[in-house]
Amino acid sequence: MTRKGFVIFVTFVVACSCVLGRAAAAQDAQPLRLSLEEARTRAVAASHRLAEARARASVAEAAVEIRQVADRPVVGASAGYTRTNHVTEFLFPGPTGGPRVLYPDVPDNYRTRVDLQWPIYTGGRTDALERAARADASAAEADVAAAQADLRLEVTRAFWAVVTAQATAVVVQQGLTRAQAHLSDVRQRFAAGLIPPNEVAAAQAQESRDRMLLIEAGNQRALASAELARLIGVDLLQPIDPVEALDVPAAPASPLAALVADARGLRNERRALEQRIAAADEQRLAAEAGRRPTVAVTGGFDYARPNPRIFPRARRWDDSWDAGIAVGWSLWDGGRTRAEARQAAGIAAASRQRLAEFDSVLALEVQQRLLDIDSGRAAIAAADDAVRAAGEARRVVAERYGSGVATQTDVLDAEVALLQAGLDRTRALAGVRLADARLARALGR
């Protein structure tokens, strides 16, 4: 083996050892017992998607601060140095007969200035932009709340998926135990010469099928547990043990109209749309304010060598100041202001149509979730009856088979029917739990 091949082999062995060691450590780790509310709390703290939404909300808050300070005075300081060419000095005779310099040769020019700009009237543009920024910030906060509600629903779905897979494994394990007991009984009958060998093979096939279903249920539980672990921010190999049972939730007490009204008041997506409509309206007002004049107070203090405001020029440092009021009025901008106003008005109109669509879909969504819960409750009641009926049928068939008046096929059919009834009940319970979680999400709770 070459040196390069040996290095690759050692690296592969070390990597495999780390993976196997990690898997073994995860198997030896104590299961993490979690309630649904604890899982939601952990997910909110660990979610990168929620952290991104919060970061966007902080950006919107910073935009509000930018708009707030837009009408405050701005004070700046500047300094500069300029080198000019030499010029001929301008002289004239002084009172005493000697020459007096009016324009000296000063090639080195230094200038410092403190400047003030203070907009005192902008036609309402600054205030409108600030209100628009506040509306955008409120919409961003609503987006954070909506993202948190989506995350809670996702965690709830994963949590009940783990519970459902666990309950499914229990049902299949019970069926496997019955199949193993039946297989043992069939083998004893075959050894005694009471039945043909094909009945043993049929019992073995049923036992193998139940074992396969148990493996599938275990794999589904592992996958659901890994998904829940990802959401709550723990190791994917960390075993999770839900502490809540798969039972029937309480039925909604309010009628459909009341629930829809509550949803319109609680849904953060709707609040975000309303705030974005308000922001677009304020943006339109800000654009229309461009047709009005602006007034600003200006001023400054200069300290320069030579100071161009001092006559005659001299090779020395002099100070000066200025203050004034500047008025600006855009008389014609080529249609820019009108286009900006139309753009903002179009955004507001589109958001209003989206809000109307949201309201119509919201009512349908709430009604659909209520019907899902109603159908699920009916399915649970039917599954309970089916489990009782299948259990009683299996008991009767087992007694008849023991008495020799029923066939092996009858026993296997009864076993399959009982197992299927138990699985149907588990699925019905999970469906109601998921429908209840979706209803809570539709209501904005």
Image (spheres, rainbow, N blue to C red):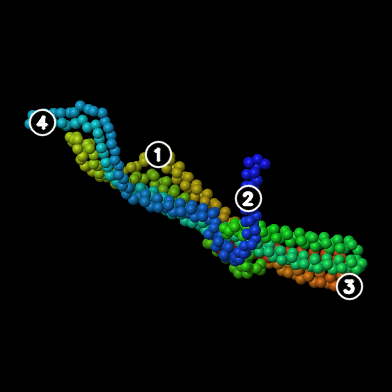
Q: Secondary structure at mark 2?
A: helix
Note whether 316 is above or below 349 in the view shown.
Answer: above
Closer to viewer: mark 4 or mark 2: 2
Q: Secondary structure at mark 1?
A: loop
Note whether 299 is above or below 107 in the view shown.
Answer: below
- Determine the image quadrant of residue 162: bottom right
Closer to viewer: mark 4 or mark 3: 3
- Determine the image quadrant of residue 409: bottom right
- Assign the C terminus to one quadrant of the image: bottom right
Q: Earlier in the sequence, mark 3 or mark 1?
A: 1
Residue at x 31% of width, y 45% of height = 76
CA–CA distance in space, label 3 to label 1: 102 Å
The residue where tag 1 is placed is 333
Closer to viewer: mark 3 or mark 1: 3
The residue where tag 3 is placed is 403
Amino acid type indicated by mark 4: Gly
Q: How many marks?
A: 4
Q: Earlier in the sequence, mark 4 or mark 2?
A: 2
CA–CA distance in space, label 4 to label 2: 98 Å
